[in-house]
Amino acid sequence: MTPIITAFERSPDRGQGLARDMPVRWALEEVGQPYDVRLLSFSEMKESPHLVLHPFGQIPTYEEGDLALFESGAIVFHIAERHAGLLPDDANARARAITWMFAALNTVEPPIIEREMAMLVEQDKTWYKERLPILEDRVRVRLDGLSSRLGDADWLDDGFSAGDLLMVTVLRRLKGSGILEKYPNLSAYVARGEARPAYKRAFDDQLAVFTSKQPTG
Ligand SMILES: N[C@@H](CCC(=O)N[C@@H](CS)C(=O)NCC(=O)O)C(=O)O
């Protein structure tokens, strides 16, 4: 059965692959599972029938027969559990890889998103200039820990796993910020993830959605 995921009809990131359909696409590509995509406008995301699939009216969702999932991390976890290639067989190594999945979404991503949101919606506030460095320091605290742990390893725990897939996806949000670039091992880690053929296929597919919507001529 071919799973169906949802994605933005017109992604606000203009095809940079920052929307959360990207990790789902990447996971599906890593395991070689073909999939279909249903594109949604912003208004469709907030209406039935999408709200039945996603209580918060967001993308991505994942449908596979009777199963409907939301939350990119849960979807990646489901894919990793059902297919070989994204989680190790050894029980302890698997538990550690799952730990990195949570770390990516629960510990590293929140300060990155908080900074991003401030830059998007708080720039006109009087306190913005004072608050931004505080938010950036919170990001650095996480990157310090992650960078020390990664050291000169290729991946977070031996071979590439769903933990790396989510961590690379989260760190990509900082590209060009000048923050990630101060951590050469993390920049190289992101580049390693982006160099994977499955990543490239996923990226090109989500970019094609954006470019095909652009007016020509
Ligand atoms: N924690 C959720 C976040 C989902 C999310 O924020 N989706 C964004 C796109 S990346 C969205 O649909 N934004 C539109 C909205 O919230 O109205 C996940 O990882 O799936």
Image (cartoon, helix red, strand yellow):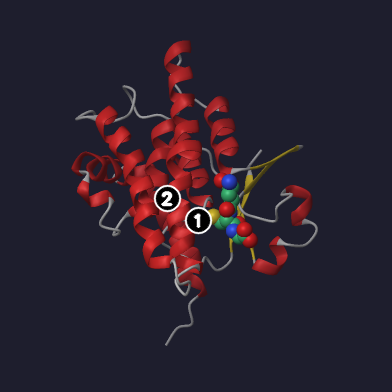
Tell me if 61 is positioned left or right of 10 in this view. right
Pointer 2 and pointer 1: residues touching (CB < 8 Å)? no
Give the quarter of the figure containing the C terminus: bottom left
Q: CA distance from mark 2 to mark 1?
A: 14 Å
In the displayed structure, would residue 32 be above or below residue 115? above
Q: Residues within 10 Å of mark 1 (few under 14, many from 20)?
A: many
Q: Which of these two is toward me, 17 or 120?
A: 120
Mark 1, ligand 1, within 8 Å: the answer is: yes
Tell me if 157 is positioned left or right of 52 in this view. left
In the displayed structure, would residue 67 be above or below residue 93? below
Tell me if 170 is positioned left or right of 153 in this view. right
Q: Please tell me which of labels 2 and 1 falls first in the chain.
A: 1
Identify the residue position indicated by label 2 in the image: 112
Q: Position of residue 192 (x, y in %)?
A: 27, 41
Identify the residue position indicated by label 1 in the image: 19
Q: Residue furthest top?
A: 91
In the displayed structure, would residue 60 be above or below residue 208? above
| Residue plotted at (41% across, 59% down) | 131
Given the image, on which type of amino acid does mark 2 rest? Ile
Secondary element type, mark 1: loop
Q: Nearer the viewer, mark 2 or mark 1?
A: 2
Given the image, on which type of amino acid does mark 1 rest? Ala
Q: Which of these two is toward me, 216 or 132?
A: 132
Q: Position of residue 69 (x, y in %)?
A: 68, 40
